Image (cartoon, rainbow, N blue to C red):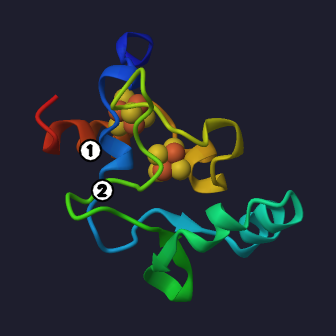
Amino acid sequence: MTEELDCLTCGACCRTGADGRILIPPEDLVRWRKMGRDDIAAAVQPGHFGLVGFATREDGSCVHLGTPNSAHACRIYDLRGTTCRDFEKGSSQCLEFRRDAGH
Ligand code: SF4
Ligand code: SF4
């Protein structure tokens, strides 16, 4: 099942709504600033649990979602946040996001 899921035709977990749900641990902010990517560290909004989350567009998608080649790809994939890296394709949350997105 998991092998059959194709993130590049999905992107549902990067479209979780406009309330800062994709959280960013402080270490990520430090990491981006150290590498001179203050732009990524600044593209945040208040999130849950006193943390910040990735800034979102009006449609609830992460501001980093979408490349010239794919509407479902991450523009900062190699530098993406810990939450993004840890998110498991095929997990119950993944399947829930997919279901909510109608995939
Ligand atoms: S919701 Fe699941 S299948 Fe869709 S992009 Fe995220 S990890 Fe991949
Ligand atoms: S940083 Fe990339 S992987 Fe993480 S939520 Fe945004 S678009 Fe998705």
Identify the amino acid type marked 1. Answer: Phe
The residue shown at (63%, 61%) is: 40
Tell me: is circle 2 under 8 Å from ligand 2.
yes
Q: Quadrant of residue 41?
A: bottom right
Q: Nearer the viewer, mark 1 or mark 2?
A: 2
Q: Quadrant of the N terminus?
A: top left
**Looking at the picture, how far across and down is residue 38, in whole percent?**
72, 67
Q: Most extreme residue toward the right, as rendered?
A: 34
Q: Most extreme residue toward the top, as rendered?
A: 4
Label 2 sits on residue = 16
Identify the amino acid type marked 2. Answer: Thr
Q: CA distance from mark 1 to mark 2?
A: 8 Å
Which of these two is toward me, 54 or 38? Answer: 38
Which of these two is toward me, 51 or 90? Answer: 51
Label 1 sits on residue = 97
Q: Quadrant of ligand 1?
A: top left
Tell me: is circle 1 under 8 Å from ligand 1.
yes
Residue 90 in view in this figure: no
The residue shown at (52%, 73%) is: 44
The residue shown at (36%, 18%) is: 5
Q: Quadrant of residue 8?
A: top left
Q: Quadrant of the C terminus?
A: top left
Are the residues tagged 1 and 2 within 8 Å (C-beta)?
yes
Count of number-bearing discs = 2
**Looking at the picture, how far across and down is residue 97, in whole percent?**
26, 44
Residue 95 in view in this figure: yes
**Looking at the picture, how far across and down is residue 26, in whole percent?**
72, 75
SS state under label 2: loop
Q: Is residue 44 above or below residue 15?
A: below
